[in-house]
Image: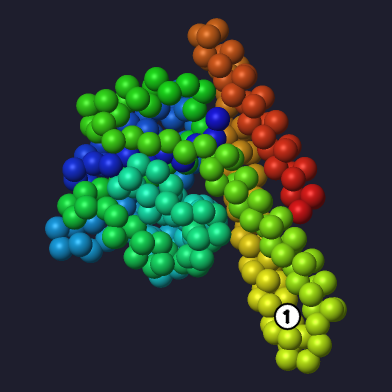
Amino acid sequence: MEKMIQAVFNSEVEAFKGLQAIQQLGNNKDISVGETYILTKDAEGKTSIRSAKDSDAGSGTLGGGVLGGLIGLLAGPLGLLVGVAGGMIAGSASETLRAENVSDYLDAVAANVPNGRSVLVAHIWEDWEVPLNTAMLSLTSDLSRYNLDEQVYVPAHSELTKVGEDIKAAETKYLEADGATKADWNNTLQELRTKRENLQRKLNINVDHQEQQYQAWIDHHTEELEQDEEMKERLRHRAAAQRARLEALKKNRSEY
């Protein structure tokens, strides 16, 4: 199942060890690993974010609009992190969608991550939770998982549907109105249409990223090289589930 995980550590060094543990699980094919980020808030409250997969940044530090696929989209990783202190996602899809860039997200995150702490964010697919739980056991007890389909993508699509319904209602009101009221409803319509366009754009970008990530995961599976029959079967099952999800993404794209 596709998930976003976040784990809180007492230092950036421990977070890096957590990242290495996740990468090793990926190498062992216990899980599939996508984007990974480490967000750190120093003793003075300055926040920084590092990406293990950002080759353009050289040092791995993200900045100046260098965004990973899910960062800056929808209620992406940093949007999830807004709720790190409470162990839950803060706000609805409509609220988190207001953050247009990394700076907006960092401002929100900085208010919730304690000084001197680091948070590891990873986009993964796991068949069961034991491997990751075991790998994190000696490093942190603060580990959260988010089902991306249920907690991010479905709410985003629901928001798009709601905006469409609001537009239809506003169009009816506009046709019935006159004078200054008609002008007010025209302004409302323009705002709603702009909101729909922005949301649609983000959804399209996000689906592009999802499809690329799923294809990369599928291509990475080499169960025919495995000697262990249990591992072969697990990889076959994972690949089949990921292919099914990829096909569903393509089908959903045509519907909105």
Measured from the top left, where is residue 224 in percent x and y?
60, 17
Residue displayed at 77% across by 43% down: 251
Nearer to me, 53 or 197: 197
Residue displayed at 30% across by 47% down: 85
Q: Name the quadrant containing residue 93.
A: bottom right
Residue displayed at 34% across by 65% down: 107
Query: Can residue 227 be spotted in the picture?
Result: no
Left or right: 149 with respect to 175? Answer: left
Q: What residue did someone put label 1 on?
A: 185
Query: Can residue 164 be spotted in the picture?
Result: yes
Left or right: 20 with respect to 101? Answer: left
Q: From what the image shows, is residue 129 above or below residue 39?
A: above
Where, quadrant-wise, is the C terminus in this rendering? bottom right
Q: From what the image shows, is residue 180 above or below residue 219?
A: below
Q: Name the quadrant containing residue 172.
A: bottom right
Nearer to me, 34 or 189: 189
Left or right: 107 with respect to 250? Answer: left
At label 1, counting other C-alpha atoms closer than 10 Å, the crowd grade (few under 14, some 14-19, many 20 or more) is: many
Where, quadrant-wise, is the N terminus in this rendering? top right
Nearer to me, 90 or 103: 90
How is the model colour-coded?
Answer: rainbow
Tell how many labels. 1
Measured from the top left, where is residue 17 in percent x and y?
26, 36
Residue at the top extreme, as displayed: 229
Measured from the top left, where is residue 130 in percent x and y?
39, 20
Residue displayed at 67% across by 34% down: 245
Please state which amino acid type lies under the numbered disc 1. Answer: Trp
Instruction: Classify mark 1: helix, strand or loop.
Output: helix
Residue at the left extreme, as displayed: 43
